[in-house]
Image (cartoon, helix red, strand yellow):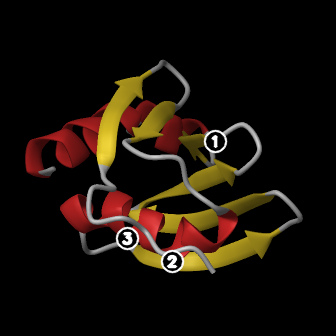
Amino acid sequence: MQQLTPKQGIESITYQQDHLNILFAQNWYQEDITELSKLVFLPVEPVIIKEQNFGADREDIRFNWNENYFVLNFDFYSQSCWIEGQDSAATECLNLLYTAINKRS
């Protein structure tokens, strides 16, 4: 298993109307997803993880924050990471999640 380098962090988060794009400072491996998700969740704790789905090259984490459900997605091959609302109410709250992550990170 590859270890995260001390320089790993969130390089940028971009707000889109229906999702948040997250770019990490370093390339990452699928084995790093647990640590990467901690980097994303740390600024907005408490976060309640409801479900995790593991695939060959993609993983997602369904979580509850501020009484809304979101999905944190990781795709190893494209080095993509994004958050989307589980429903329209959560999608409307993406701007609040974006502000909270950026305010504390």
Q: Are marks 2 and 3 in contact (CB under 8 Å)?
A: no
Identity, as a three-letter code, of the amino acid under mark 3: Lys
Q: Can residue 76 be seen in the rendering of this structure? A: yes
Q: Mark 2, mark 3: which one is toward the viewer?
A: 3
User: Residues under labels 2 and 1: Cα distance?
Assistant: 22 Å
- Mark with earlier residue (2, 1): 2
Q: Residue at x 89, y 64 (%)?
A: 56
User: Which residue is most to the right?
Assistant: 56
Q: Position of residue 9 (x, y in %)?
A: 30, 52
Q: Mark 2, mark 1: which one is toward the viewer?
A: 1
Residue wearing tag 3:
38
Q: Are marks 3 and 1 in contact (CB under 8 Å)?
A: no
Identify the secondary structure beneath mark 1. loop
In the rendered structure, find residue 67 and report the number of the disc placed on it: none
Q: Position of residue 55 (x, y in %)?
A: 86, 66
Left or right relative to 48: residue 73 = right
Q: Are marks 2 and 1 in contact (CB under 8 Å)?
A: no
Tell me: residue 45, above or below residue 88: below
Q: Residues within 10 Å of mark 2 (few under 14, many from 20)?
A: some
Q: Can residue 66 be seen in the rendering of this structure? A: no
Q: Residue at x 77, y 44 (%)?
A: 77
Identity, as a three-letter code, of the amino acid under mark 2: Ile
Dividing the picture into quadrants, the one containing residue 93 is top left
Left or right relative to 13: residue 60 = right
Residue wearing tag 1:
79
Identify the secondary structure beneath mark 3. helix
Residue wearing tag 2:
49
User: Residues under labels 2 and 3: Cα distance?
Assistant: 11 Å
User: Residues under labels 3 and 1: Cα distance?
Assistant: 17 Å
